[in-house]
């Protein structure tokens, strides 16, 4: 360790209150049909609005966004997929593929996403994972890699299922975070968005014996400006579900809806989608939360040669969309003094940022200067210099 800290840490708390003269729109609960719903910032994953967003529920065919992104990341679009007996026997909604037929992987991806064909999803899973079980292992491992703690896949198509570990499920928040990965973080995000935005797609089996045209069932594409991706779903246990993303003015908003009505309430999901996206667009704007100009006090340095204090800085930037009523609080932890030597870019403290009293992130504070420690040679030279002067 390059230095010793002799004093107690100073704790400096600065509160930035942004709600002066503003009405807190959170005071009015949004009118939603969904049992669970969430709106998140696509750039940061921060929850902007939630209703039971951490409650585990079945998610029906919204499952297929995970199936698609894994197929894009691990498969070759030109691969030939041979249809198994098991895949061909999947219940509606189905493309109607027949055991032994072959299709390009890319064609089955459009079938699965645009019209939510369950047989195509299983054929894809078997091809990518070697078996359905192998693919489910990939799905659940990816969920863990994304930091999801309450998502569990039992089927690649979202059909209701139960095993010894529970039911096929996720939460609204975690489903939205899967979509964030698909459109913002995955190396295959552009291919994912391209499929989601395709209105109609025509293809045939490898032999050319049968041809198909699939049409996108995400009606919200033409209901709301800026929709870049989305997937619907329905099962008896899950009800109507939807996960979608909108991009407006370089800002991305993601929603997820679970349990959004049962027949005959098919349109509820579109009403909730419009409500949540409009809420985000109307209430959240760009804010600079942190940059290198954040004010920090110098730190005193004992037994240094060049100077008796150092300046410090943070080397991070944080920009996000925030509502006017939200609070940002900063906590700075730095020593009152340091013992030389101190080197440039040494970590000398930390800055914690809280948003609405929840810890958002911790950022290092660095030394901007270098101060060497006094030694016998320094004292000897000092004495000689004073003697000669």
Image: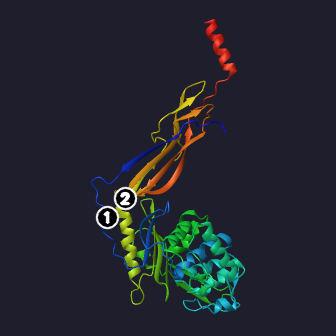
Q: Picture quarter containing residue 98? A: bottom right
Which image quadrant is residue 2 in? Answer: top right
Q: Find the distance from the CA under tag 2 to the CA under tag 1.
A: 9 Å
Position of residue 317 relative to residue 118, above or below, is above
Contact between marks 2 and 1 (CB within 8 A): the answer is yes
Specify which label sits upstream in the sequence, 2 or 1: 1
Quadrant of image for the N terminus: top right
Picture layout, residue 1 above or below residue 19: above
Mark 2 secondary-structure assignment: loop
Q: Residue at x 39, y 48 (%)?
A: 15
Residue 4 visible to the viewer: yes
| Residue 323 numbered mark, or none | 2
| Image quadrant in which the C terminus is located | top right
Which residue is tagged 1?
Answer: 25
Query: Where is residue 206 shown, x and y percent of the image?
Result: 68, 85
Q: How many marks?
A: 2
Q: Nearer the viewer, residue 159 or 341?
A: 341
Vertical relation: 271 (above or below) 7: below
Residue 81 location, x and y as percent? 69, 82
* Residue 318 seen from this side: no
Residue 201 position within the rendered picture, expressed as x and y whole percent measured from the top left: 55, 80
């Amino acid at each position: 360790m390059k230095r010793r800290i002799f004093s107690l840490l100073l704790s400096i708390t600065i509160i930035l209150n942004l709600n002066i003269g503003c009405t807190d729109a959170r005071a009015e609960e949004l009118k939603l049909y969904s049992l669970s719903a969430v709106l998140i910032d696509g750039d940061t994953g921060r929850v902007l609005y939630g209703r039971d967003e951490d409650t585990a529920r079945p998610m029906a065919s919204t499952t297929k966004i995970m199936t698609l992104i894994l197929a894009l990341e691990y498969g070759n679009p030109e691969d030939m997929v041979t249809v198994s007996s098991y895949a061909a026997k999947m219940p509606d909604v189905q493309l109607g593929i027949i055991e032994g037929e072959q299709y390009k992987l890319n064609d089955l991806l459009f079938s699965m996403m645009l019209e939510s064909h369950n047989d195509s999803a299983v054929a894809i899973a078997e091809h990518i994972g070697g078996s359905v079980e192998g693919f489910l292992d990939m799905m659940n491992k990816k969920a863990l890699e994304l930091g999801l703690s309450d998502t569990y896949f039992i089927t690649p198509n979202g059909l209701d299922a139960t095993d010894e570990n529970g039911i096929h499920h996720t939460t609204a928040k975690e489903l939205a975070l899967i979509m964030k990965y698909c459109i913002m973080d995955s190396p295959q995000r552009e291919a994912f968005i391209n499929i989601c935005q395709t209105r109609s797609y025509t293809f045939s089996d490898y032999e050319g014996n049968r041809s198909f045209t699939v049409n996108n069932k995400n009606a919200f594409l033409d209901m709301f400006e800026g929709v870049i991706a989305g997937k619907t779903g329905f099962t008896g246990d899950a009800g109507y579900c939807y996960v979608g993303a909108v991009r407006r003015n370089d800002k991305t908003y993601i929603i997820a809806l679970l349990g959004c009505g049962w027949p005959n309430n098919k349109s509820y999901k579109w009403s909730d989608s419009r409500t949540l996206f409009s809420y985000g667009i109307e209430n959240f704007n760009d804010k600079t939360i942190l940059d290198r100009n954040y004010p920090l006090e110098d730190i005193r340095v004992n037994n240094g040669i060049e100077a008796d204090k150092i300046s410090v800085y943070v080397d991070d930037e944080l920009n996000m969309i925030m509502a006017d009523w939200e609070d940002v609080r900063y906590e700075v932890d730095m020593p009152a003094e340091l013992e030389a030597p101190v080197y440039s870019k040494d970590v000398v403290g930390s800055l914690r940022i809280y948003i609405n009293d929840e810890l958002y992130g911790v950022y290092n504070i660095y030394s901007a200067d270098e101060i060497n420690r006094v030694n016998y040679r320094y004292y000897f030279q000092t004495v000689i210099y004073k003697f000669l002067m």
